[in-house]
Amino acid sequence: MIDKPIIILAIESSCDETSASVIVDGIVKSNIVAGQEVHSIYGGVVPEYASRAHQLHIVPVIHQSLSEAGVTQDQLSAIAYTKGPGLLGALLVGHSFAKGMAMGLGIPLIGVNHMQAHILAHFIDEPKPEFPFLCLTVSGGHTQLVWVKSVLEFEIIGETNDDAVGEAFDKAAKTLGLGYPGGPLVDKYAKLGNPKAYKFPIPEVEDFNFSFSGIKTAFLYFAREKGPEFIQENIADVCASVQYTLVEMLMKKLIKAAKHLNTKQIAIAGGVSANSGLRTRLQVEAQKQGWQVFIPAFEYCTDNAAMVAITAHFLYQNKQFSSLHDSPMPRLHLNS
Ligand code: KG4
Ligand code: ZN
């Protein structure tokens, strides 16, 4: 008898992207992402507007995802959704929709941890890391060094004591008068500038942990001292220097943790892994240290449902289903 394929529809709605993906036997067949323009004029994500935009986008995004994959609802084996961490109102939209579909179709529901999904995005395409490997997870809400022992076993080696590095990029961009989301804009201007033009202090932080609150303030004081005209005229050099500083802060701890764990299997994940400075710096360090590095394709760095789908595939194989009574958890920990 031929086994039925495992076909999962996954929904991601933790922040400001509404995304749906279909995965068939571990192969991603579609990954549709709808962004939310509404936040740009506010210089940051407005939670209530995020929930409303998810409600607006979710049906067309799911339809497109199913049709691009050539899959009908009655073929689905399970529905997956992002359980957390994220914005409660945003998570609730994906959760309610997934729960409704799972109940209606009489198939299992799978709640997925968003931070695990960022890491497991490395298992969508080749080359895939071998276990164990060290992953630097860098997003808008998290900065973590994770020792990944298997698809379902994660140990946090270090993390930020305060802000996430994505937040530092976004705040720096706001301070410099750039738009939102700031990370990609800092990256864009940084490509044209001198990373050593301005020097910012790199704080000493214990063990494998990070701190970005001080550097955020340093960027603010720098911008205030220089004034908007100077910043505008020197935007490329300023962005290059900001980016250089943030990347060095990440690399310092990544190198330390890799040495401590005696590993050469290094991965990066999350929105900030789209940063060109970090990607280049990692390749340079790989040459020096003899690392094998794993950098996700751009579409799997920032929030997307394909990473939720691959995680759900592993959970399905492990028969780890969610109860229909589960609730989304805005502060869900990596290991829960
Ligand atoms: O993983 P993600 O899409 O959402 C969260 O889970 O938070 O990460 C979003 C973060 C934002 O802070 C955004 O500015 C940052 O990733 N980001 C970047 C780049 N692309 C996205 N930061 C620096 N350079 C980029 N190219
Ligand atoms: Zn994310």
Image: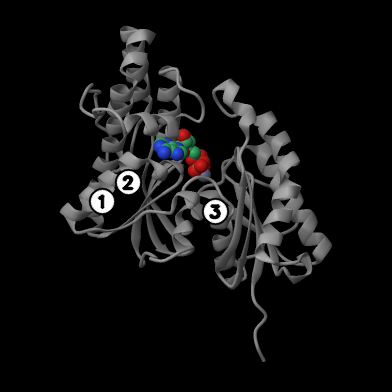
Q: Amino acid at mark 2?
A: Arg
Q: Amino acid at mark 1?
A: Gln
For label 3, the crowd category at 10 Å Cα-Cα, with few meaning under 14, some 14 to 19 and many 20 or more, is few
Q: Say whether residue 325 is left or right of residue 32.
A: right
Q: Is residue 185 above or below residue 280?
A: above
Which residue in the structure is indicated by mark 2?
A: 279
Q: Residue at x 50, y 24 (%)?
A: 179
How is the rendered protein coloured?
one colour
Which callout, 1 or 3, points to the residue nearer the camera? 1
Q: Say whether residue 247 is left or right of residue 184.
A: left
The residue lying toward the viewer, choosing from 248 and 17, is 17
Sequence order check, earlier mark of 2 and 3: 2
1 and 3 marks in contact (CB < 8 Å): no
Which residue in the structure is indicated by mark 3?
A: 336
Find numbered disc 3 in the image and state the secondary structure of the residue it sits on: loop
The single residue placed furthest to the left in the displayed view is 288
Q: Residue at x 59, y 40 (%)?
A: 86
Q: Residue at x 31, y 8 (%)?
A: 225
Which residue in the structure is indicated by mark 1?
A: 283
Q: Is residue 313 visible?
A: yes
Q: Amino acid at mark 3?
A: Ser
Q: Residue 93: image x %, image y %? A: 72, 43
Find numbered disc 2 in the image and state the secondary structure of the residue it sits on: helix
Q: Residue 310: image x %, image y %? A: 55, 62
* Label 2 within 8 A of ligand 1 by Cβ: no
